[in-house]
Image (spheres, rainbow, N blue to C red):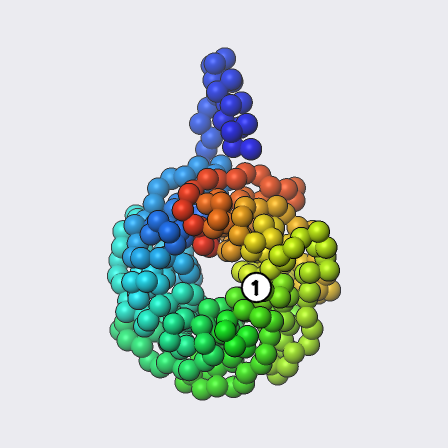
Amino acid sequence: MRSVRVLGCLLIAALGACREQEPGPDLVFVSNEETDVVDIVDGRSGRVEGQLSTGRRPRGLAFSPDGRILYVAASEANRIEAWDPRGRRLLRSYAAGSDPERFTLSPDGRTLFVANEDVALVSRLDLASGSIAWQAEVGPEPEGIGLSPDGKLVVATAETSSTVHFLDAATGQSLGTALVGSRPRDVLFVPMINEIWVSSEQRGTISVFDATTFKAKATIDLVPEYPSLENVQAVEMEVTRDGTRAFVAMGRSNQVAEIDPRTHEVVRSFPAGFRTWGVDLAPDESRLYAASGLSGELTIVDLVENEVADTVELGGKPWTAEAVTR
């Protein structure tokens, strides 16, 4: 797609009519766990605008509520980095415990809850002081982690035990544990329907829990929807603000599925690169960004036309993406 677009622009340029495309309204930051950088991409055009050189193996990303700080989990450096995303400056590094892979940010932007994968812990990190307020034991290899919109409930997944853990955000006290599909990867709160979704990489399912009682209420099974695929997976998830559209990266299925949150039915899917791991929505929700680690690509999906708009070659192993208003 990009090559066709560039060729067309060159042909028009020969006629003296080609102009540089204006920057889009958002920037996409893509963590690359192989090259130790976060790539910066124009959300509309797919143009690569630069990089942040981070600590070893950057994976999880999140923006502060005001969009002024980008937090990066440099998992093999055992730290969370705070970056000025527009000035491209490292502002501060936080000791975040061993092997921080994913994290979630409190609604007030003051606290990070971190999944420390290799030591089976969840850590509460105070951003003002840089100190860890508590650490809670969970199942082995925690990765997925989410926080309720009111900031009171932390939910963490444990890959090896195929469990999900419900924790009190203030104290770290366990509020319950449940079994889910094998190798759970991500946690998504869907507040419009009071649900918590937990994706299963190996099983290709999404376990649905009541967000008040923590009781299992449904399973969204992607496998029957894709009978021609041998390796149906479910990894990172996103939902629109109005709760009408949800998206799940399908890992080595090389797709992103769209799900209707209210019916739990698969609506459609979009082709993406090899091992599509992380997804994020544009701030205006007109586009979806999907990071694919084995093909080194970022796929840009137009959610108005419901089609792939561009494929951006980044190299390395892109892990996830986070978009912010330019």
Front-lying residue, 242 or 124: 124
- Residue drawn at x 54%, y 69% as measured from the top left: 183
Residue 40 rendering spot, x and y as whole percentages: 39, 45
- Residue drawn at x 48%, y 49% as measured from the top left: 294
* Above-or-below relation of 287 to 141: above
Which residue appears farthest toward the top when viewing the image? 15
Visible residue check, residue 320: yes
Q: Amino acid at mark 1?
A: Glu
Viewport quadrant of the N terminus = top right
Which of the 4 quarters of the picture holds residue 263? bottom right
**Residue 208 appears left or right of 27:** right
- Residue drawn at x 37%, y 51% as measured from the top left: 34
Label 1: state its secondary structure: loop
**Residue 42 appears left or right of 194:** left
Residue 314 rendering spot, x and y as whole percentages: 43, 42
Which of the 4 quarters of the picture holds residue 224? bottom right
Residue 59 rendering spot, x and y as whole percentages: 40, 58
> Which residue is tagged 1?
201
* Above-or-below relation of 201 to 44: below
Front-lying residue, 260 or 240: 260
Visible residue check, residue 151: no
Circle 1 Cα neighbour tier, 10 Å, few/some/many (<14 / 14–19 / ≥20): many
- Residue drawn at x 55%, y 61% as measured from the top left: 235
Which residue appears farthest toward the front when viewing the image? 230
Which of the 4 quarters of the picture holds residue 128? bottom left
Residue 220 rendering spot, x and y as whole percentages: 68, 66
Front-lying residue, 50 or 204: 204
